[in-house]
Amino acid sequence: MLHISGAGPAGLAAAITCARAGAKVVVHERKQTVGARFHGDFQGQENWTDTGDVIGALERMGIEPDFPHTGFTQLTVYAPSGQIFHYTGKQPLFYLVRRGSGEDTFDSALLAQARALGVEVRFGDRIQKLPEGGICAEGPRVGDVIAAGYQFSSDMADGAYAALSDDLAPKGYAYLLIHQGQATLAICIFDDFHNEHIYLERSVDFFQQQLGFSIGENAKRFGGLGNISYPATARKGNMLYVGEAAGFQDALWGFGMRYALVSGHLAAQAWLQGKPEAYDQMWQQKLGEKMRAGIVNRFLYTRLGEGGYTRFLRHLAEVGDIRQWLVRQHREQWYTRLLFPWANRVLPSKRKKYLCTHPDCTCTWCRCGKAGNKI
Ligand SMILES: Cc1cc2nc3c(=O)[nH]c(=O)nc-3n(C[C@H](O)[C@H](O)[C@H](O)COP(=O)(O)OP(=O)(O)OC[C@H]3O[C@@H](n4cnc5c(N)ncnc54)[C@H](O)[C@@H]3O)c2cc1C
């Protein structure tokens, strides 16, 4: 029997993989629903860290794309200089999905698929230890990145907008996604977390002025944190860490859903093979190169500054197919190999404080004081 703590995308992807192979799986979820930290807000299933289309990749992992998803091939980005850039990809840059516990969300679709395969999901069941091993898919614990925003009704035409400026979202970006009368306006910041509310209100004002709309009084606020790290190991004995619990996320802009699903799938395969020790090699083969490139990309991005953001956007406008360009930036290149050790030291993840590799520690997050031996 496989025990999984956490019913997010990583945990449910692991559950689906194991259940498809006929294994008995129990998923323990501390909240009463899936997607409890989201409120129907839009997220982008990124399609730029791999050549293959992400929806096809999900199908190959055994995840049915039966959740509403809309491919966006166009993106408008505002530069700090006031210039506006319009980008178009030949294939979708990302697929818009909804997160939360509602009927039409990605989370509810994964839950339904897992249950249809016989997975038992125990809600309101908070796990602290996995003494017999299993998969830890508990999501982020401390903030390396913060996202916060509003979900609201809108009569604007469908569209995707972003703004790069440290005045709006330090070292990150503000974004507005509109689809079929619903909109998500949010910031994703990598610095100055204490002033999150100031940046969010500035970003609301910015987009309202640019596009001439009002978010209204019924807007629902949401927010959360994210972990980004490149762990030396994502295993503690027979316990395998997946998704953001392992720090897996594209470090450049903080997109974590795809790596959560892939790592969940891989951990389940390692468990099915009876070889938990093979998991580190498996995720390193599939995600390692992209994650190292992502960390170097983030390291370089944090050094751009306002003028650099504009130059970066101008360069993007000249590369032709922006998706293909981004795919290339997630491959290891000579400068990635050179800069990664340094970038990885300069951008330390706060997550490292909470995990240990003590073989006799069974805490999913270390509570037994053995965290001296850090991951
Ligand atoms: C506001 C916001 C916007 C985002 N936008 C995007 C985006 O556009 N694109 C993208 O790719 N990513 C985005 N992300 C990141 C993305 O949401 C995560 O990377 C992804 O959800 C990680 O999946 P996960 O399964 O690892 O963790 P989670 O989705 O966090 O799931 C972890 C689950 O474990 C449960 N849990 C925690 N502790 C325990 C415990 N002790 N016992 C039992 N259960 C437990 C939690 O309740 C939760 O249900 C965004 C994040 C935020 C906060």
Image (cartoon, rainbow, N blue to C red):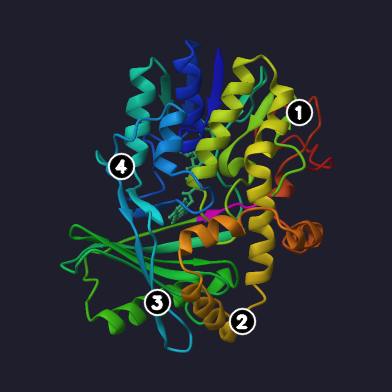
Q: Which residue is mark 3?
A: 203
Answer with left or right where residue 270 lies relative to residue 163: right
Q: Earlier in the sequence, mark 2 or mark 1?
A: 2
Residue 361: give its label: 1
* Residue 52, image x, y percentages: 48, 43
In the rendered view, would you say 84 is above or below 105?
below
Over which residues does the magenta segment extend?
225-229
Residue 305: give its label: 2
Q: Which residue is mark 4?
A: 105
Q: Residue at x 45, y 29 (%)?
A: 60
Q: Amino acid at mark 2?
A: Gly
Residue 227 magenta-highlighted: yes
Q: Nearer the viewer, residue 222 or 75?
A: 75
* Residue 350, image x, y percentages: 69, 55
Residue 165 seen in render: no
Answer with left or right where residue 159 lies relative to residue 332: left
Q: Amino acid at mark 3?
A: Ser
Residue 111 magenta-highlighted: no
* Residue 277, image x, y percentages: 74, 24
- Spatial CA span between label 4 and label 3: 26 Å
Question: Disc 3 beta carbon < 8 A from ligand 1?
Answer: no
Image quarter of residue 362 = top right
Point out the residue furthest to the front here.
Answer: 320
SS type, badge 4? loop
